[in-house]
Image: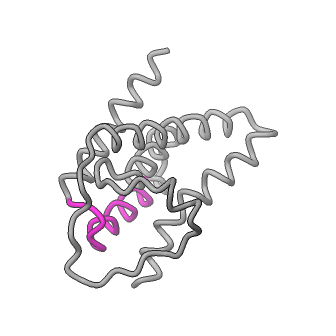
Amino acid sequence: MDFLDKFFSALPLFLISFYFLKAFTDLNSYKIVKFLLFGAVFSSLLKLLIRKKRRQKSFVFIPWQASDKLRKLNISYGFPSSHTVFYASYFFIKPSCVTVILLLLGTFFRIFYQHHTRYEVLCSILVTAMLYKIYNLR
């Protein structure tokens, strides 16, 4: 089961990288990357503004090893859930059965592995929905 946590934690980076490379030849992919990155920046700014501590896990969690330079970039606050914002952004920008499944599984595993509470995940989806509405007003 630990594999699923790592898989759904790393999937946003792989999908953004995929659409970034595809954006050189496809305008629609450029729009997808732009909104996903916009969501990531917005999520990070909200984390710095709200500064809600991460929840305590009821089991031993071994985080991935990262270099010292990457650790300095780590924003370790718990709300909003950046992964949930990513999966919700991906669903809003590219609605399909696959993105619904990714949203459901990605958010479920954020709760299951105790990275976030149900409240944090639900609020992250609502924040992303509002962000998507505002983003499309332009």
Image location of residue 98, percent across then percent down: 49, 57
> Which is nearer the eye, 34 or 49?
49
**Main structural element of the magenta stretch: helix, strand or loop?**
helix
Asked if residue 112 is positioned above or below residue 24 in the image, the reply reads below
Q: Residue at x 43, y 36 (%)?
A: 42
Numbered marks: total: 0
- Asked where in the image residue 58 lies, by quadrant, the reply is bottom left
Assess whether residue 79 is covered by the magenta stretch.
no
Q: Relative to residue 133, is residue 31 drawn left or right? A: right
User: What residue lies at 34% left-to-right and 38% top-to-bottom?
Assistant: 46
Colour scheme shown: one colour
Residue at the far right: name it: 25
Q: Residue at x 23, y 74 (%)?
A: 57
Classify the position of the N terminus by image quarter.
Answer: bottom left
Q: Residue at x 50, y 38 (%)?
A: 93
Q: Residue 112 lies in what quarter of the image?
A: bottom left
For the record, the magenta segment spans 100-117
Q: Is 45 above or below relative to 73? A: above
Q: Position of residue 114 (x, y in %)?
A: 26, 70
Answer left or right for 100 relative to 10. left
Which is more toward the observer, 54 or 68? 68
Q: Residue furthest top?
A: 138
Q: Is residue 98 above or below residue 36?
A: below
Q: Position of residue 124 (x, y in %)?
A: 30, 45
Across and down, in percent, residue 25 comes to: 81, 39
Asked if residue 96 lies left or right of residue 118, the reply is right
